[in-house]
Image (tube, helix red, strand yellow):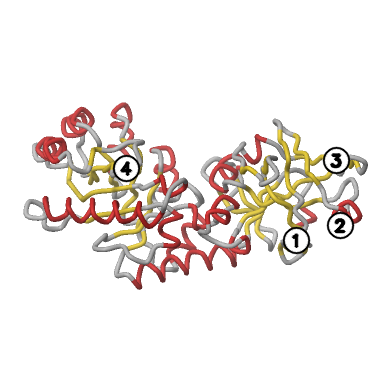
Amino acid sequence: MSYLDQITSPTLLLDEKICRANLQKMADKAKRHGMQLIPHFKTAQSHKIGNWAKEYGITEITTSSIKMAEYLSGQGWERIHIAFPFNPLEADRLNEIASSQGMSVQLINTETAQKLADTLTNPVSFFIEIDAGYGRTGVDSKDYLGIQKILDIAKSSTNLNFRGFYLHPGHTYYGDIPSIYEETREALSRLKKEFKSQYPDLVTRTGDTPGCSVVEDFGDIDQLGPGNFVFYDLMQAYLGSCSKSDIAVAMAVPVVDIKKDRKEILVHGGGVHFAKDVLSREDGGKNFGELVYLNDDGWVIPEDGSHLKSISQEHGVLKASDELLNKVKVGDVLGILPIHSCMTADCMGAYLTLDGKWVDHAEGSKN
């Protein structure tokens, strides 16, 4: 039976071959640069995909929440890192996970450092998150005094152990990647030199899919931590991080109505399935996802420009090409490449592979 026979409502499809190729390519890049790949699993959030990742030498992963870390713990990872300024209200949950799973967290202030120093009864490592221009979160890269205050608090605890510096240059999504990575390399190298005498084993990590995909000069950075690369998406394709053929997920959506006079197709697939990330088109319109033709082997990417022009909660309206209008009928199932695969996967909570098997996601119930 074809996987297509299982689809009656919006379903997130996963091409295992493309996903594995993306894992292999990034693992090879890290190895080529003498770095360790520690992918951010906020994109995949899956035990099964985690097992695939292990086949490419990946032994540690990153999450964006303690809830995600709880889901992925106990799966044989050497360490799970929570790459979000740690929430001190979750100290007890962290302590519970750390009783059986290697853990590390991200600190940006003395208050949270003190809370963990006072309450941890199980060992937890930490990175100090650094801001070198993104402006979202982190200790300023030149604030050595602020960094030292966090380190001094940690020294009072036998269970809170400094691991290194983490820098997420998220502005690569909007700015000049080579310039941003020059700042990133300089900031992390400077911090390594400043604190290496106190902590000879400290490591530095950076992680963003656009930069990790295209940059070839990482200086003396030790670890790569991109996340979206495991699936990629249209945003990454338009940024130049990948080609559309590297996108490993597509949403299967049923056709519920056709308006040939308006060249529009109504599909069951809206904001609760895709989220509402959007790209701007050259003609001033909006792009919430682009058409692919589904077949038993996966999907084919056309050149006709059919795309989701609008979405609401459950509805999606496709601006359709003449080719599509001549092919489609009510009851057919079309594929849509998502703008932001992380958010789409989070909405859907499960994946259907091209061989008809369900793959787990932290937010879903199918396993």
In primary-sequence order, the first of circles 1 and 2 is 1
Residues at discs 2 and 4 in contact (Cβ within 8 Å) = no
Disc 2 and disc 3: Cα gap in Å? 18 Å
Furthest residue toward left: 197
In this picture, is 266 found above or below 358?
Answer: above
In primary-sequence order, the first of circles 3 and 1 is 3
Task: Decide which of 287, 163 is in the foreground and name it.
Answer: 287
In primary-sequence order, the first of circles 2 and 3 is 3
What residue type is disc 3 on? Val
Residue beneath disc 1 = 302
Disc 2 and disc 4: Cα gap in Å? 46 Å
The residue that appears at 21% across and 44% down in the rendered structure is 123
Q: Residues within 10 Å of mark 1 (few under 14, many from 20)?
A: few
Residue beneath disc 2 = 323
The residue tagged with tag 1: helix, strand or loop? loop
Residues at discs 1 and 2 in contact (Cβ within 8 Å) = yes
Per the rendering, the mark at residue 121 is none
Q: Residues within 10 Å of mark 4 (few under 14, many from 20)?
A: some
Question: How many marks overall?
Answer: 4
**Foreground: disc 2 or disc 4:** 4
77 lies left or right of 240? left
What residue type is disc 1 on? Pro
Residue 331 placement (x, y as % from top left): 87, 47
What residue type is disc 4 on? Gly
In this picture, is 120 found above or below 358?
Answer: above
Per the rendering, the mark at residue 133 is 4
In primary-sequence order, the first of circles 2 and 4 is 4
The residue tagged with tag 2: helix, strand or loop? helix
Q: Quadrant of residue 263?
A: top right
